Structure formats: C-alpha cells, structure tokens
Image (cartoon, coloured by chain):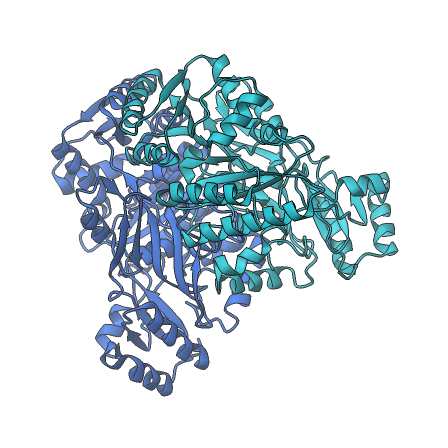
Chain colours: A cyan, B blue
Amino acid sequence: MEKRFNQSVFEELKSLLQDRVTSETNIRNEHGVGYSYHACTPPDCVVFPKNTQEIAEIVKICANHKTPIIPFGAGTSVEGHVLALEGGVCVDLSKMNHIIEINTDDMYVTVESGVTRNQIDEALEGSGFFFPIGPGVNATLGGMASTRASGTNAVRYGTMKDNVLTLTAVLPNGDVIHTGSKAKKSSAGYDLTRLLVGAEGTLGIITELTLKLHSYPEAIFAAVCSFPSVELAVNTVIKTIQKGIQMAKIELLDDQMMRAINLYSALNYAEKPTLFLEFGGSKVELEEQIRKVEEIAHEHKVIEFLWEKGEENRKKLWRARTDAAPAAVALREGGKLMSTDVCVPISKLAKCIVDTQVDIAETNILAPILGHVGDGNFHLTIVVDPNDANEIERAKALNERLVKRALDFGGTCTGEHGIGIGKLHFMQPEHGDALNMMRTIKRAIDPDNIMNPGKLLP
Amino acid sequence: MEKRFNQSVFEELKSLLQDRVTSETNIRNEHGVGYSYHACTPPDCVVFPKNTQEIAEIVKICANHKTPIIPFGAGTSVEGHVLALEGGVCVDLSKMNHIIEINTDDMYVTVESGVTRNQIDEALEGSGFFFPIGPGVNATLGGMASTRASGTNAVRYGTMKDNVLTLTAVLPNGDVIHTGSKAKKSSAGYDLTRLLVGAEGTLGIITELTLKLHSYPEAIFAAVCSFPSVELAVNTVIKTIQKGIQMAKIELLDDQMMRAINLYSALNYAEKPTLFLEFGGSKVELEEQIRKVEEIAHEHKVIEFLWEKGEENRKKLWRARTDAAPAAVALREGGKLMSTDVCVPISKLAKCIVDTQVDIAETNILAPILGHVGDGNFHLTIVVDPNDANEIERAKALNERLVKRALDFGGTCTGEHGIGIGKLHFMQPEHGDALNMMRTIKRAIDPDNIMNPGKLLP
C-alpha cells in the first residue's frame, strides 16, 4: 500500500498538540492491533486530542496532506478495524473520556466518545437507570457506535443503532456536525445518525454521543436450562418471543461451550445445548413470565430448568457467560482466539448452528458456539494454534463456509462485530448492487479516502 | 421552475406501459396534492407500474431526459411531498399492492410499497400478530417509510425507522438495490435502510419493504384521565415512563381538542387537559400497571380516571382520537385544516405546549392540540378560513413560532410529518452544517436532481 504520511504532517500535529503526539514504536504498535488474529499494522504516529475542536484541526491537517486517519477507542474490535493499512495518524480518544450530562427526566446521557461502558455503569450506579448495550469487553462508546455493537441485552433493548439519539462528528473535510436531536423522534431529513453508526470511522470521527437510558427493572431473575438438542432450545426461544414475553437476555451455549465454562469458572452445568435467560420487570410480571417460559421449555423437552433468583448466583452466571471467550481459549494451551459472528432469521438458526457443528467436527477445529439467540446471532469462538499455518487456513475456510451458510439462509455476514478487514470480501455477496450505493456515499463524503481507508468497503 | 418533461418521455413511457400512463387533467390534478394546505401542483403525466422492474425502466427513461419523478402512495402526506414542483412523471404505486409474505416464525411481513395500513391489518387478522405503526390515515407503507411515520403506538414500538427490516428500492440511475437482511440485526456496512427511510423519495423509490411484526397482547385496557393542567398531565407521563411501565399509547388532548371530540363524537368527557392511555400485556401485568399509573396520576392531582376495560368502549375511545382532526375542522364551518407537528425532549413538553397555547390565544387562531406525548411529539390542528389571506398568514406565523420554540427547546421541526416543502426553511436552523452532508449525499446519488426535486433539501 502507498504511504501518505510525511514529516510535515508530524510537525504540524506537534505544533498543535505538543507532547500529545508521538511516533514511539511501542505506542504505535499498541495502536496497530485490536483483539483479533489480524497482524499488527502500526500507524505512523498517534495523537491524543482533548476535544472535538482539536480533532477538527487534526483532520484538517491530515486532509491537506491526504494522510489517513484511524480513530482508536479501546482497541477491542475483532475484525482489524484499527489497523493502519496505509499508515497515517491514529486518533486515540482516551482523553475524550468525560461524561457531559446525565438527564434522567429525558432519559439520556451525553458522553465524549472515549468514555467506556464501565464508566457509564459507574456513573449511573444508584440512579435507577442504565445503558443496556454492552459487548463482552470494556469498549468505548465511540467504538461501539462505529461498529453498531449490541450484546446480550439487544433482544430487548436493540443495538447501538436504536440507542443513539445524537452524535457529534468531525467529517473528512474538518466540518463539525451535530446529527439528530434530543427529541425522541424526528422526520426532519436524512438520518445521518444511523449513517454514522456502523460506518466504522470511514465517514468521519464520532466525538460525542447522546445515548438513551432505560429504567432499571424492579426485579431480575435468571435461569439456566439445558436441552437434548439445539433445535429444541431454539424453538423454545422462538415460541417465547412469539408469545410477546420480553426477555432481557437469551443466550445459547452449545455443549462444547458449556464444557469450556464449566472448566474455566468451576461450574457444574450439564454439557448440553443450554439457554441462559434473564428477565427484568416487576415481581408480579416475573412470576408470570417464569411460569409461561417453564411451560414452553417443558413442551420442548427441557432436561433441567434452574432458576437463579438470587443476585449472587445471577452475577456468577453472567460472569461465566462474559468469560466464555477466555474459557474457550483456555481449553487449549497456547491457543489463540479467532472470533467470528453471523446473524440469520431465527427460524433458520437451529439448522445453521447444527450444520456448522457438523462442519466444525469434520474440519477438526476447536470452535465452541455461543449466541445471542433471541436475535438469531451466534459466534464461533475458534481457537487455533497460532504457529500452525495449515490449521489457521482450515479455520479461515470454516469461517468462509459459516458466512456463506448464513447468507444462504437470508442472514448477514456479521451481526455485531463489523466488517473491518476480516469480512470485506463478503460485502459484495451480501449486498450486491447496494454496495455501489455505499461506495457512492463514501466517495462523496471522503473523496480522498482519508478516513480509516481499507475498512468496510472492498 | 424550469420544466424538464417532453413529448418523447411520454412516448417512451407509453410504449413501456400502454394504457398505464396518462396525462388526463383530472388524474394529474388528483396526483398534484396531498392532505394539506399546499396548492395543487400537478405532474405532466401519471404512470401506474405493476412491479419493481417496470419502475426501474420508468426511472431509466426519466433519467435519460433528466425528467423529475414523484413517487405517489395514497396521497395522504401533509407537507406537500407529492407536489410536482418542476413537473415530471408521477409514479402512482397503487397497483403495487400485494402482500408478498407473512412469516410468523421470524415475525415479519413483506409487502409491495403500495400496500396500505388497513390491508396489513386485514391480512394479519386472527394471526396473533400486528404491525404497530399507523398514522391517522390509511397511508401506504412506502409513503410511511418515506416520511418516517409513527403515530400513537410509537412510544412502545418505535417509528418506521425501527420497524423496517429490508427495502427494495430503485435508485435515480435505475439500479435496483436490496438493503438490509431478514436477520434481526447486522453490522455489515452502511445502514442504507435507515438512509432511505425518511428520505421522502429524494434518493430513490421504495418498491418493497419487509416490516417487523409484533405479537398481539393477551389483554388491552384503555383509560381516560383529565388533569387541572398540561404540566400535571405531562409529569404523570414522565413519571410513568421513568418507572419503566410500558404503555402502548399515551395521547394528550388539550381542552380545545376535548371540546372538539365531545361535539364530533357525541362524547361527554371533561374539557380539560386529558390523557388517553392504552396498555397491552397479560391480565396480571395490566392489573399491576393500572394500580401504579393510577397512583402516579393521583400524585399529580388527576381529576377523573376512567378505565375502559371493555373492547367496545375502548374502540369508541380510539375512534374519537382518530377522528380528532376532522373533529377540529368541524368546529368551524368551511374551515380548512393546516396540520403541523413538532417534537421536543419530554421534560420541555409541558412548557412548549403551554407557551404555544398562550400564543394561539394571542394570535386568535383556532388550533386544538393533541400529541403523542410519550414521545414529546405534538400537533397543532390549525383550522383556517381558506378565503381569509390575513388569517392564513397569521396561522403560518404561528407555525413559525411553534417550530422556533421547539428548536429552542432542543427539539425538531417535525416528529412524524416530514419536511416536504412546508418545512424546508427549518432545515438550516435545525441541522446547521449537517445539512451540507445531506446535500453531499443527495448530489452523489441523484446528480441530476430527478428524484422528487424541491423536497426535503432547501
């Protein structure tokens, strides 16, 4: 790839930011890789702006020199979103970590884009409100918006696309724009908020966000239920959703994944296809929902149905779920995680998972499955020997077949991880001519292709 | 305005569609106006395509001649969306009225864009599922998507932006694209679905949609409660939402509007600021919610709290609500409706409404208020004498002040009606530099400005 960075970019940034720009190798290397198997590709320098205005100045400098800009939150993305493929300037948002306003009357919180999930949780502690979207790691809100993240609560509360009210962003020409309004809805013009959410930093840098808050339920119960087959587990979920029962979380773990978490978290669950469920609401509502879901589960031959009504057991359960990825990796000494996800219409989910399990067995790859099954979304936590090139190739081929299967079922190549560089080649098969429209938009807004080049659009 | 239509466009359309193209004056005039005070501006001809492929051919013919194209659903928009400002070809979608698939496992329905709200209701009758979004009229789904419509259920189920899974659209160059997937979520690329929803036909013509279905609640109760003041009514709503009580509908009618519906629907409600509420869920849930909401309402000095548990009374109540606009018009013989809406953060709603009531009184205009108050969205149903130019000017000035007030409160110039031509001049004050980004997108996708020119973007 052609490099588009030069000494005068560095000098101009230096005079703007003084010691908040660096080209130290260690720091560059830390910023050239996410939580993924993609090889580190460092930027030429890293800047640490403190506010939107500074970012606008940085972007103007880079735009003048056609220098690539790569936004960097917590570096937790899994598809290579932060790799500096053409070099350039990494904009580290860690100093943009202020919570600007918590408004409980209008139920929103406004944050700088470097604020993390855990920071929001801490700030809202005791307020009676919470922000529901959370990937399994302590990502930044800017990064979560940019990859259209979701996680375990999405089945009830939606994804980032549903929970961002307004954005402030710096466009490739240095313009600062404010999208949306703090009103709950609007029919005034193009939905730029939803265009920037999921754009992976290719149209601009998100610098502030206003996010919807939700009221904390009066009571929360969780349950663990194991089934004789994936089909029976998934059909339990379909029936439950059809009945209008609003679960907060519906997670599926396959037998392999149950083995992994039993070992890792010293648990003793049946190593069968298992649902982890969570319900939130008033006590009266929950008692009724429990009764209904148990009934549906028994219709689907549930083996065991364990309610976790106490807070401690519930937290233990979800900690085990959160630790699923490290648990999978721990199954194999020296193993490295290669995480992938797809999403299909829920009626196709059981078949998609079962076909994938057969494929995993035939390929002889370690790949426990877990999924946000209420959304039809599931993950393969592939664990490979990083020194075995042949195995890595087989794992990649497994991923290819997984995505092809999901697309054949009318699904998408990624439910929540994003495209980055890892899924670029699936954009054409998934979107067909709609991809041309995406390219037209990208070219119009970023004609010199300086915003996170090489990502999202093949 | 320059006309961009000529005889050869007509001939080419004729050879494609035979008798499904017309330039008859009556038909052109019927297609040159919506449900609004904007004067009829007819197209040069009207075409009646039967499928997406025909629309693509029509668009290619028009693109060749740079002829404007105006999509036309049921003609129920209120801000002049269907006026043929520069002449051209009106694409009437009434023959695109087929329901393609109802899928209850995956809870979606796929329709052609000329299918109406009532058609969907009829098709789903008895299925246990429903589609929640409904403006007060029998609009088409294509039109509703294009104006990002919502209505009384939006407080619980969201707006069109939240309920469209996939779209098929014909772009200005004649390309047919399919956006989104039938999976419930995706992180694969730019969200073209949300870009086309609310674009008012300025980026392309929506020809098919897949819409989310929701399960019909086990039980539905409604209530009518009158309050001494708008503030107390709104604060009841804020508190209820904060408590996480999920109401299906929360409508506010001011004293004037109550007078109108009492007269029109032969009812006998108190002519005070009033909430119409609807709850859906299981019987157990509803009994609990009733208790909580009554408690909150009494804390806010509710005058009367009438529960309507029976289906007949409930239907009567919502019919009265649906008839609010004609009821307002009926207050004045020969009066004509000039409908407008704004949306503000809910904490600002009471003040915004009260200030507006003062303004209405001072302006001496008949303008009952009703609103989807759970969303902070309200309507002025202004009723003017169409022959009194001075009064129309005063009404327009009232609308200007209303919008300015909403923007000052951090709101939007329209919550659900759209921009059309009626609210064009508010786009700059509302969006600032973000408007440039909208223009960049429009120019890139429709460089010859053939798609519904003159709408949405000033």
User: Relative to residue A305, is residue A93 drawn left or right?
Assistant: right
Residue A112, percent from left and from top = 64, 36
Q: Residue at x 41, y 74 (%)?
A: B68
Q: Which quadrant of the rendered structure holds the C terminus of chain A?
A: bottom right
Q: Quadrant of residue A78?
A: top right
User: Relative to residue B451, is residue B334 drawn left or right?
Assistant: left
- Residue A97 in sight from this viewpoint: yes
Q: Quadrant of residue B20?
A: bottom left
Q: Is residue B10 above or below residue A144?
A: below
- Residue B397 in sight from this viewpoint: no
Residue A3, percent from left and from top = 79, 59
**Near-viewer residue (B329 or A338):** A338
User: Relative to residue B131, is residue B63 drawn left or right?
Assistant: right
Residue A46, percent from left and from top = 79, 44
Q: Quadrant of residue A309?
A: top left
Residue B119, percent from left and from top = 21, 53
Q: Residue at x 44, y 75 (%)?
A: B1
**Near-viewer residue (B384 or A159):** A159
**Near-viewer residue (A228 or B32):** A228
Q: Is residue A77 above or below residue A272?
A: below
